């Protein structure tokens, strides 16, 4: 579960990205975070990923107060979080298989286990046949699916996605969103920041709306 208690985030330039934000996201759920550009969606995801820390308030993930994590505990926490970017961020000089394997290599997973997990992740996004291809050979939609496979290959309990369909046409966007809903079937908690309003009414997902760093609407119930 994810819990924000009166969370504020102010940057050095004076921008208050979040203002007294309180919310709850259940474990194993899929939740959309929406709102205008600059509403605080990305900041919220970065706080959950522990890429940034709150200026005020508390952020809890699975009963852990993230502000209290230090050293190796931060590394262990981050290994349980997969992040999907809008721009893929794939390494052009590595194959699809090598790109997906990166989180496992960093974590020191043995090669034979690494290969098995990579193949399983690629199978889930229907790209096992492209394992030896390079990013430059892939379509935009295929690159995004590789990004999802990389985020989930270490079997994290939490997947965060920042505008994952922002560069995709409606058909490809639907395909990518379908993958996220399949992850939920594996009891993975999925949080997606998105402007794609076509998916927000899905009864299987919750929806939280931000406006200038504050929660203005909760449609998850």
Image: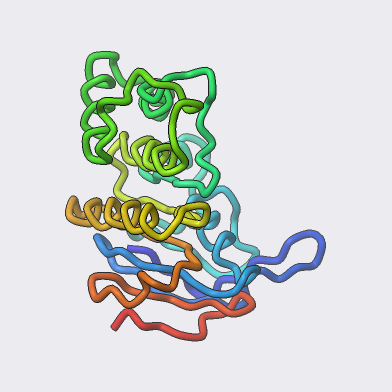
State the residue at coordinates (55%, 54%): 46
Task: State which quadrant residue 219 falls in.
Answer: bottom left
Report the colour scheme.
rainbow
Q: Nearer the viewer, residue 28 or 173?
A: 173
State the residue at coordinates (31%, 21%): 109
| Quadrant occupied by the C terminus | bottom left
Q: Position of residue 113 (x, y in %)?
A: 23, 20
Q: Position of residue 114 (x, y in %)?
A: 28, 21
| Quadrant occupied by the N terminus | bottom left
Task: State which quadrant residue 108 falls in.
Answer: top left
176 vs 37: above or below: above
- The extreme left residue here reads 185
Q: Nearer the viewer, residue 113 or 172?
A: 172
Q: Position of residue 192 (x, y in %)?
A: 42, 60
Q: Is residue 178 left or right of residue 69?
A: left
Q: Nearer the viewer, residue 111 or 47?
A: 111
State the residue at coordinates (55%, 44%): 87
Q: Is residue 120 left or right of residue 70?
A: left
Q: How many marks?
A: 0
Q: Position of residue 86 (x, y in %)?
A: 52, 49
123 vs 156: above or below: above
State the residue at coordinates (45%, 46%): 84
Q: Is residue 60 left or right of residue 93?
A: left
Q: Is residue 153 left or right of residue 3?
A: left
Q: Nearer the viewer, residue 7 or 139?
A: 139
- The extreme top residue here reads 111
């Amino acid at each position: 579960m994810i819990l924000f208690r009166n969370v504020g985030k102010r940057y050095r330039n004076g921008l208050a990205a979040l203002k007294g934000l309180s919310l709850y996201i259940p474990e194993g759920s899929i939740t959309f975070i929406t709102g205008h550009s600059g509403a605080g969606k990305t900041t919220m995801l970065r706080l959950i990923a522990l890429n940034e820390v709150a200026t005020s308030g508390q952020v809890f993930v699975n009963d852990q107060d993230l502000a209290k994590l230090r050293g190796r505990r931060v590394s262990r926490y981050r290994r349980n979080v997969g992040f999907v970017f809008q721009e893929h961020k794939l390494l052009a000089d590595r194959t699809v298989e090598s790109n997906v394997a990166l989180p496992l290599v960093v974590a020191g997973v043995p090669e034979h286990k690494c290969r098995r997990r990579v193949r399983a992740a690629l199978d889930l996004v229907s790209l096992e046949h492209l394992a030896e291809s390079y990013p430059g050979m892939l379509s935009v939609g295929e690159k995004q699916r590789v990004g999802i496979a990389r985020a989930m290959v270490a079997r994290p309990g939490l997947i965060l996605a920042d505008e994952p369909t922002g560069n995709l046409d409606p058909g490809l966007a639907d395909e990518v969103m379908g993958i996220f809903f399949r992850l939920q079937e594996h009891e993975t908690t999925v949080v997606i920041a998105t402007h794609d309003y076509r998916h927000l009414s899905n009864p299987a997902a919750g929806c939280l709306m931000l406006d200038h760093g504050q929660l203005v609407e909760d449609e998850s119930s």
